[in-house]
Amino acid sequence: MSHNTWLHRISRQLVRPLLDTPVTPNHLTTARLATGVAAAGCFALDEGRWDVIGAGIFVVSMLLDRADGELARMKGTSSRFGAFYDLATDAISNSCVFFGLGIAAMDGVLGLWALPVGFLAGISISAIFYLIIATEARYGNGTASFDARAGFDPDDALILVPIGVLFGLGDLLLIGAGVCAPLAVLVIGHDLYRRGQRLSAKRRSGKSRKTGAVGVRLKQAD
């Protein structure tokens, strides 16, 4: 995902006071996981007060999701493990949120179908993050990032979750996620596959040029 969205810019300012403290990016990532799961639990209760609390917690969780990377870049402590941990907690947190929405929606128009729809949305989101993790593990950090448009990236669409819950649109939100998340897996998966093909071709081309240059030097030496 992009590192220059509005949420990243806000998080960047929020983590500046942490630069000279023992707080690490992984601490923030763990807090992101805890708040994401807590928000899911609040949504699952399907009560007005807990919906408001859950919405607030989820917004904090989204900010923490951006803050860990910002702190890592500011402190110069970015690592492959940190990137993997960040993406893994994203997958778990966001999946749990849709599971929670599915549980809450079982008393609505979807009935018992709400749970499998929430499960489908959650699994689809996990699949997206798995594809990103696999791509970056193979080709390097940042190779699966997406450019921000108007200060937003695809991941920022999750801001619709707390908004939808606060306005009592949880069922509609769940249906939309159940339809759009699997489609997003296909679109993003295809995009990442094409990136992988291009990066593999570039690597092969680089190796060929290097091998050719070595051959020329050896020939000249003869």
Image (cartoon, helix red, strand yellow):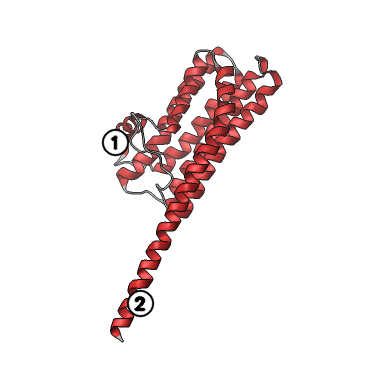
Q: Visible in this render: residue 95? A: no
Towards the viewer: 190 or 15:
190
Amino acid type for the residue under numbered disc 2: Gly
**Residue 65 position within the rendered picture, expressed as x and y whole percent measured from the top left:** 43, 35
Q: Visible in this render: residue 205? A: yes
Marks 2 and 1, Cα distance to the nearest angstrom? 52 Å
Assign a secondary structure to mark 1. Answer: helix
The N terminus is located in which quarter? top left
Instruction: Tell me whether the residue at label 2 lies in contact with that at label 1, contact meaning CB atoms closer than 8 angstroms.
Output: no
Question: From what the image shows, is residue 103 above or below residue 67?
Answer: above
* Earlier residue among tags 2 and 1: 1
Towards the viewer: 188 or 37:
188
The residue carrying mark 1 is 16
Question: From what the image shows, is residue 158 above or below residue 45?
Answer: below
**Residue 4 position within the rendered picture, expressed as x and y whole percent measured from the top left:** 33, 36
**Residue 220 position within the rendered picture, expressed as x and y whole percent measured from the top left:** 28, 82
Q: Which mark is residue 215?
A: 2
Question: Could you tell me how many numbered marks the image carries?
Answer: 2
Q: Residue at x 48, y 21 (%)?
A: 162
Towards the viewer: 63 or 202:
202
Question: From what the image shows, is residue 179 above or below residue 198?
Answer: above
Assign a secondary structure to mark 2. Answer: helix
For discs 2 and 1, the disc positioned in front in the rendered view:
2
The local crowd at label 1, few if under 14, some if 14 to 19, many if 20 or more residues have their Cα within 10 Å, is some
Q: Which mark is residue 99?
A: none
The C terminus is located in which quarter? bottom left
Question: From what the image shows, is residue 54 above or below residue 21?
Answer: above
The local crowd at label 2, few if under 14, some if 14 to 19, many if 20 or more residues have their Cα within 10 Å, is few
Amino acid type for the residue under numbered disc 1: Arg
